[in-house]
Amino acid sequence: MFVAAAIPKILDPPAFAHMIYNYRLVPGGLINALALVMPWIELFAGLALVLGVWKRAAALVAGALLLVFLVAIGWNLARGHAIDCGCFDVRSAGKSREEQLADMRWVLLRDVGLLILTAQVLAATSPRVGSSSRLSRG
Amino acid sequence: MVRASNVGRVLALLVLAAAGAAISNLAATTQRKLPWVGNYPQALKFEPAAALPSSPPTRIEKKEAPAEIAQSPPSTAAPAAKSAVTSPATGAGDLVRSFPPHPDKPALEIAPADVQRLYEGKALFLDARRSSVYAEGHIAGARSFPVWESDIDQRVKGLYEEGLDQRAPVVVYCSGGACEDSHMLAEKLYMVGFDNVLIYKDGFPDWQKRALPTSKGANP
């Protein structure tokens, strides 16, 4: 999912910068840098998880990204600011405010689910899990 | 517990990501390139939707002095709106009389009927949406000024260097609704001295709905 989400953002950074701007949470000077780097973080974390290399580090990065997404979506949902999430598609979907808010609730749920999966990877690769000493090297 | 090796790997992932972003941005076309430091003065501004009227005036911070984008004052544009549907095409002088410059504000938001009158009067129209969206369809004759693309400042500078009358009305538009690209373009135009920027708030969707002239492709 991270890899799939990263591709459209990497292909069109200005569109992703516009999405970040719409969140109204990032200072103007940082928006472009975030739009340029964040998709690549998603891509490398996703690839590492898929390929099974540096699994714990990749899960930590993925978890941190998911927490950022959760806070950003949750914050805007709480203050009634309807936006396109820009998760997999960086072009405006032209949806109504109500549709956008409904989508944001689903995104929140999905990100919680992904965070749980990430926590499982972290638990499985924990050095404290005796039986997973082989995994912890990943 | 996060071991030192994992911290190193996390840092390595971040460095790889930054390198990927840098190379990708260097190789990107003008339409897909981004300057690393953005300039979006309104980036943290948020007003609850419930507290806003349907077409709210929007404040814009200007370096020299605070300025605001306001709705068109009733004394000038509102009468024009009433006569817009039936009025014939007007000259540039008539347009300036009907839509006088407003050097204290980056832009005024205007009603669709005023937009039509300005179009008939051959006012300059600028499209603030992405160039790819512009190519899919735009107001016939409007020029592309994609505010999210890396060459926007060069385009604005180029327009300034054309030596146009900066007091003449310039209409900017984007996708209507919550789209703010036209406001961002208005501020850039204001900063180089255009004193009569007018925002077509309902934008291209409204223009299409009213079956007014459109064009496709990269050219006006």
Image (spheres, coloured by chain):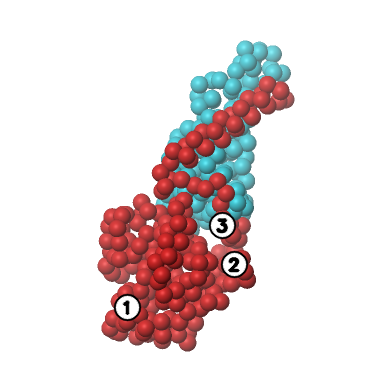
Upstream in sequence: badge 1 or badge 3:
3
**Circle 3: element type:** loop
Query: What chain does mark 3 sit on?
Result: B
Q: Amino acid at mark 1?
A: Gly
Q: State the separation of the CA atoms marked 2 and 1.
A: 30 Å
Residue that appears at 59% across and 64% down: B47
- Residue A11 visible in the shown view: yes
- Circle 1 sits on which residue? B121
* Badge 1: residue crowd in 10 Å (few <14, some 14–19, many ≥20): some
Identify by letter the chain in cyan.
A
Q: Position of residue A117 (x, y in %)?
A: 57, 30
Left or right side of B123 for A111: right
Identify by letter the chain in red.
B
Q: Amino acid at mark 2?
A: Lys
Q: State the separation of the CA atoms marked 2 and 3.
A: 11 Å
- Residue A24 visible in the shown view: no
- Circle 2 sits on which residue? B62
Image quadrant holding the N terminus of chain B, namely top right
Quadrant assignment, res B133: bottom left
Residue that appears at 56% across and 35% down: B18
Q: Position of residue A119 (x, y in %)?
A: 62, 29
Q: Which mark is residue A114?
A: none
Q: Nearer the viewer, mark 2 or mark 3?
A: 2
Q: Nearer the viewer, residue B155 or A128?
A: B155
- Residue A55 vs B38, above or below: the answer is above
Q: Which mark is residue B40?
A: 3
* Badge 3: residue crowd in 10 Å (few <14, some 14–19, many ≥20): some
Q: Amino acid at mark 3?
A: Tyr
